[in-house]
Image (tube, helix red, strand yellow):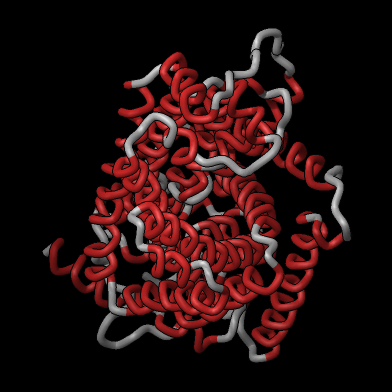
């Protein structure tokens, strides 16, 4: 009798048309691949230029940067267990704080992620060029270095993964999971090689190849300001696990798998980042890295190239390319589900919430996400400024993470019925301790990031990410007010929409 009652209830529950086909491995891969990109080959070393004086303290700064990321991940896990729906962070904030804050914050996240997808697609081509040149495929390398080919191939890669996402979760998982394991296998080459050699080996190789010696690295003292600034930059490495929450409407057994996938992804990525960075700094003196970062762009393959045969260097560059490729399907999933969730609530044009009858994917949202990412590719190609969009993404994600911690605090007051569904950290006291700790640390990181942006010397005001982010928030506010006004004029009870969860 109980089973028949449950079955009847399930049939009466409104459905979106999304299919709950994604398992734990696919969810974890989504978070891992959104977090791990080619930046791991660059940021831990170019940090010596962006934060002069960090010197030998990069690894401790990484560890410190992981702390607020863990608090944010725990907030996401708590909220995901109670609200397993497509749209993740938007749904959480709109039900726990206010629909306005949920929309405008997630809109800036969507904007930053969409531009980042375009940047990733465009930056991927030079990595493929370097692989071709390392294999002595000079004609291929020269073609990949030309402007038209770079633009065409970037667009081709992007729309290939749009098509994969359109065809459903099974093809998505069959593509993403093997690529994830290949990325880890090639990344392991860096870790093993870095710990197999020491700094004496590097000094000897540098002297033999270029006749140069390692600069003196003695006498650098710990400076808290540099340490905090470096941690704020390195925090960007942990952005991406929230994409798991965006897939909340397609997870099997979501109350269990969503929090578990978040925990797996941030633990795995954190360990990989630390091992990867420690391996390079074990083999290459930080003083040499700092000296070279001040005068040129450096990467992990370029540093280990002094110690490894050419074939192994190719493997490292290929690993960086695979890491970039992995970003695309996972990030496309995240941005399309945000748009789908907005449209489902009626605060974005309704056609965006359409689901493909055969593949059970939000095909309109995916195509629009591809169009927006294509704009990012064209902007990268014409302007050559890759990093403004990344800075906007960091700002928007810090704001979103901060709102997730506030959502844990506010949910029992605003929506006690939904709060009863929490299955992670069920102790209210524990929730409050974790959330307030996250608010303090993430708020501090946000202030440091904004200060660093506004104090940077740039040629025009619009190269500061903060005013551009505020402009994006203004556009989001205008869209929200227009759509909510339309809903009210048509007789819809707007408050009632946000007092309950969206359909599954």
| Quadrant showing the C terminus | bottom left
Query: In this orientation, which residue lies closer to the viewer: 45 or 16?
Result: 45
Query: In this orientation, which residue lies closer to the viewer: 209 or 250?
Result: 209
Residue 344 visible in the displayed image: no
In the rendered image, residue 269, in percent from the top left (x then y), is placed at 40, 39
Is 235 on the left-hand or right-hand side of 165? right
In which quadrant of the rendered view does residue 58 lie?
Answer: top right
In the rendered image, residue 344, in percent from the top left (x then y), is placed at 50, 77
Residue at 64% of width from left, 47% of height from top?
A: 398
In which quadrant of the rendered view does residue 297 lie?
Answer: top right
| Quadrant showing the N terminus | bottom left
Is 128 on the left-hand or right-hand side of 64? left
In the rendered image, residue 497, in percent from the top left (x then y), is placed at 55, 72
Query: In this orientation, which residue lies closer to the viewer: 51 or 152?
Result: 152
Residue at 68% of width from left, 84% of height from top?
A: 488
Is 289 on the left-hand or right-hand side of 142? right
Residue 49 visible in the displayed image: yes
Query: In this orientation, which residue lies closer to the viewer: 378 or 316?
Result: 316
377, above or below 191, in the image:
below
150, above or below 93, in the image:
below
């Amino acid at each position: 009798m109980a089973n028949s009652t449950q079955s009847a209830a399930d049939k009466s529950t409104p459905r979106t048309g999304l299919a709950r086909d994604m398992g734990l491995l696919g969810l974890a891969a989504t978070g891992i691949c959104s977090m791990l990109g080619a930046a791991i080959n660059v940021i831990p070393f170019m940090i010596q230029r962006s934060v002069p004086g960090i010197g030998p303290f990069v690894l401790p700064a990484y560890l410190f940067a992981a702390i607020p990321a863990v608090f944010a991940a725990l907030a996401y896990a708590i909220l995901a267990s109670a609200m397993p729906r497509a749209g993740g962070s938007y749904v959480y904030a709109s039900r726990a704080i206010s629909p306005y804050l949920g929309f405008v914050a997630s809109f800036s996240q969507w904007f930053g992620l969409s531009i980042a997808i375009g940047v990733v697609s465009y930056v991927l081509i030079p990595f493929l060029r370097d692989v071709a040149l390392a294999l002595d495929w000079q004609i291929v390398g020269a073609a990949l270095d030309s402007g038209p080919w770079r633009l065409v191939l970037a667009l081709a890669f992007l729309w290939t993964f749009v098509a994969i996402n359109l065809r459903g979760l099974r093809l998505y998982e069959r593509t993403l999971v093997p690529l994830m394991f290949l990325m880890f296998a090639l990344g392991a080459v860096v870790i093993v090689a870095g710990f197999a050699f020491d700094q004496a080996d590097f000094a000897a190789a540098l002297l033999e190849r270029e006749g140069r010696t390692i600069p003196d690295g003695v006498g650098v003292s710990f400076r808290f300001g540099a340490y905090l600034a470096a941690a704020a930059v390195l925090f960007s490495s942990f952005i991406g696990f929230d994409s798991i929450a965006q897939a909340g409407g397609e997870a099997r057994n979501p109350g269990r798998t969503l929090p578990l996938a978040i925990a797996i992804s941030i633990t795995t990525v954190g360990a990989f980042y630390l091992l990867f960075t420690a391996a390079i700094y074990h083999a290459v003196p930080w003083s040499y890295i700092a000296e070279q970062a001040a005068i040129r762009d450096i990467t992990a393959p370029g540093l280990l190239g002094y110690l490894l045969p050419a074939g192994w260097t190719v493997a490292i560059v290929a690993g960086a390319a695979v890491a970039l490729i992995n970003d695309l399907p996972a990030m496309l999933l995240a941005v399309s589900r945000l748009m789908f969730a907005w449209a489902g609530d009626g605060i974005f044009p309704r056609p965006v919430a359409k689901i493909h009858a055969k593949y059970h994917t939000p095909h309109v949202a995916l195509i629009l996400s591809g169009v927006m990412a294509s704009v990012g590719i064209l902007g990268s190609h014409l302007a050559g400024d890759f990093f403004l969009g990344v800075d906007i993404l960091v700002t928007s994600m810090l704001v979103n993470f901060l709102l997730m911690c506030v959502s844990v605090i506010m949910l029992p007051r605003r929506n006690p019925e939904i709060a009863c569904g929490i299955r992670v950290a069920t102790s209210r006291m524990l929730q409050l301790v974790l959330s307030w700790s996250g608010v303090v640390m993430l708020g501090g990181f946000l202030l440091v990031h904004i200060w660093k942006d506004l104090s940077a010397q740039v040629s025009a005001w619009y190269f500061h990410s903060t005013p551009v982010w505020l402009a994006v928030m203004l556009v989001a506010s205008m869209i929200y007010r227009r759509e909510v006004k339309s809903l009210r004029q048509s007789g819809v009870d707007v408050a009632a929409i946000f007092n309950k969860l969206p359909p599954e």
